[in-house]
Structures are given as structure tokens and as C-alpha cells.
Amino acid sequence: MIALALWGPLAAFGSSCTWAFASARYAQASRDVGSARVNLARAIVVVPIYLTFTAFRLGAHFTDGVTVRGSGWLLGSVLCSYAIADNLFFTAARRIGISTALSIASTYPLWAALVGAFYGERFGPLRAAATLLCVFGVVALVRLAPDRKIDAAGTGHKDTWGIVLAFITSILWAGNSVSIKHGAVGLDVFQANAIRYLMALVLLGAQVLLSRTPPPQPRPVRGWASLLPAIIADAFFGSVFYVYGLSHTDLSVGAPLSSQAPLLSVPIAILMGEERWSPARFLAVTVTVTGVVVLIVGG
């Protein structure tokens, strides 16, 4: 039987698994309809599910534990992910290429761990080394992957503004981890996600309505329906894992473990014949897996 102390780290790592599955489908859909509309679709699907689960679990105590301070933290998590950071990331990726943008943005667990240390969380040499192994292993995996451009103007030149946007994304993604850590205190995991996605629904709906970009050409129902498995895997199961993992671990453990989607996508891409194995990639995987194991078992 898995020790209770391991459930938090395992949940954080589980959120990486669901994101590895869903992110490729989201990226494809984002090119067709825009990231804001894809994120809005996620919120539309899962808000009723979270509200139903919360009502079933808490009944008349639906709002127990909800505070202005906690809600402010959860609003911060939405702003640091769906509402602002994700759009900045896609803009950066279009300017400097997906690999460079993701390499820079993937350093966010370092900033989250430093914030955790500031709040008094344990951050000894072993945990610090494991965090660095995870972060730099993921960055290496991203850099070793073939560069897939977002569009025709994707990359090929130095773009200072694109680099700045990617770095801001890294800071905001760290802010998302910190906000979840503090905002979910005293809340049921479904309750916390219901609040987050309700906020996201309002903000993303306004963002889409106020957008000056023309609406996409009508898509077949099955086109949107094909997103449903990815949305359920990520926005429901993944978000439950993410909130539980971040709220039941220190930031120096939960943030790196929740950022391992590039590690998980490598063997899938190789098995599908989309990418090739190499000694450098093997070394990057070994370094990253070592960091993951240390954080889960001995961090």
C-alpha cells in the first residue's frame, strides 16, 4: 500500500501524465480556433462536472472554507495560467519557436521552489539537486526535440521580445503553482477546481467576446467532440491531480513533478516513429528520471 506521504508527489506527477496526453490535441486545436477558445471549451465542459461533484460531496456545506483571501489566490492561479500566461506562451512560441519558448518557460519550478523556501519550506541540498535535475533535464529534452513551428513565421532568428515573453510565462507559471498551494488550503479538491474554472469561464468568455479577431469558420460538431477525451483527462483528472499534488507537497516537490510532460512525451513520440532516440536524449531522460525518483521517494 502506498504511504500517505507519497500521494501528493504522485498526484503532482500524474498531472504531468494527463497534460502529456492532452497538450498535443490542444496545440492542434489552438492553431485552428485560438488558445482562448480551446481554454474556454475546457471550462464549459468541466464546470458542470465540478459543481456536481462538489454538491454531492459537500451538500449544504458547498461554500465551507471559501474565503476572500483564498478566492483571491485561486483567481491569481487562473490569471497565471489560462487567462494570461498560456496566451503569452503561444505568442512567444510563434516568435522564437516552440522549443526555445518551452525551454525558457519550463524553468518555472525553480522560481516556485525559491518562493516555497521563502515561506519556510524545506529546501535542503538533496531536494535542491533533484529540482535542478528535473528542470534542466526537461529543458534538455525540449531543446533536443525537433523544432515544430507554430506557423510560417515561427522561428529562425533572435527575437528579444519573444524571449522576454517566454521568461514572463515562466514567472507566471510559477505564480500559478504558488497560488494553488495557498488558495486550496481548507478546500475540497473539487470545490477548489469548481471555483477556478468558474472564474476561468467568466474571464475566457469575456476574452473571446472582446477579441477583435474574427471567429473561426464553423467546425463540425465531431471536431469539437474530438477534444472531449483530452478535456476530461486534463481539465478534470489532471486538474484534480494538480490541485491535490500542489496542496499536499512543498513547492520544491510539486512544481517540478507537475512539469514533466516533455519527459513523458519522448517515449510516446519515439514509439510512434515521430522522433529518434539518441545518446544525448538518453542522458537527458536519465537525469530527469533521477530527479523525479528522488523527489517522490526521498525529497
Image (cartoon, rainbow, N blue to C red):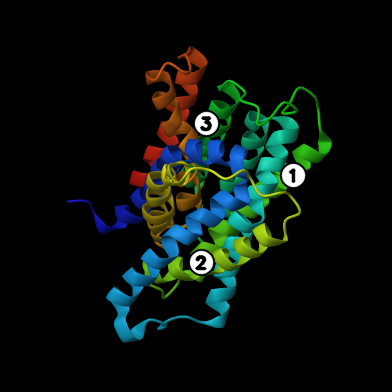
- Is residue 24 found left or right of 9 in the rendered image? right
- Mark yes or no: residue 91 visible: yes
Q: Earlier in the sequence, mark 2 or mark 3?
A: 3
Front one among 20 and 116: 20
- In terms of secondary structure, where does tag 3 sit? helix
Residue 47: image location, x then y, percent: 44, 65
**Mark 2 and 3 residues: CB-CB less than 8 Å, in contact?**
no
| Residue for point 33% across, 45% down | 297
- Whether residue 12 sits left or right of residue 146 in the image: it is left
- Residue wearing tag 3: 137
Nearer mark to the viewer, of 2 and 1: 2
Q: Nearer the viewer, mark 2 or mark 3?
A: 2
Please name the amino acid that badge 2 sits on.
Arg
Spot occupied by residue 287 in the image (x, y as percentages of width and height): 46, 28
The mark tally for this picture is: 3
* Residue 179 position within the rendered picture, expressed as x and y whole percent measured from the top left: 56, 64
Q: Which mark is residue 165?
A: 1
Up-down relation of residue 158 to residue 55 (above or below): above
Residues at marks 2 and 3, CA–CA distance in whole angstroms:
30 Å
Residue at horizontal 51 percent and vertical 82 percent from the top: 67
Q: Residues within 10 Å of mark 1 (few under 14, many from 20)?
A: many
Q: What is the three-letter code of the residue carrying label 3?
A: Gly
Q: Residue at x 59, y 55 (%)?
A: 82
Q: Identify the mark at residue 196; answer none if there is no mark.
A: 2
Q: Is residue 193 above or below residue 66?
A: above
Q: Earlier in the sequence, mark 3 or mark 1?
A: 3
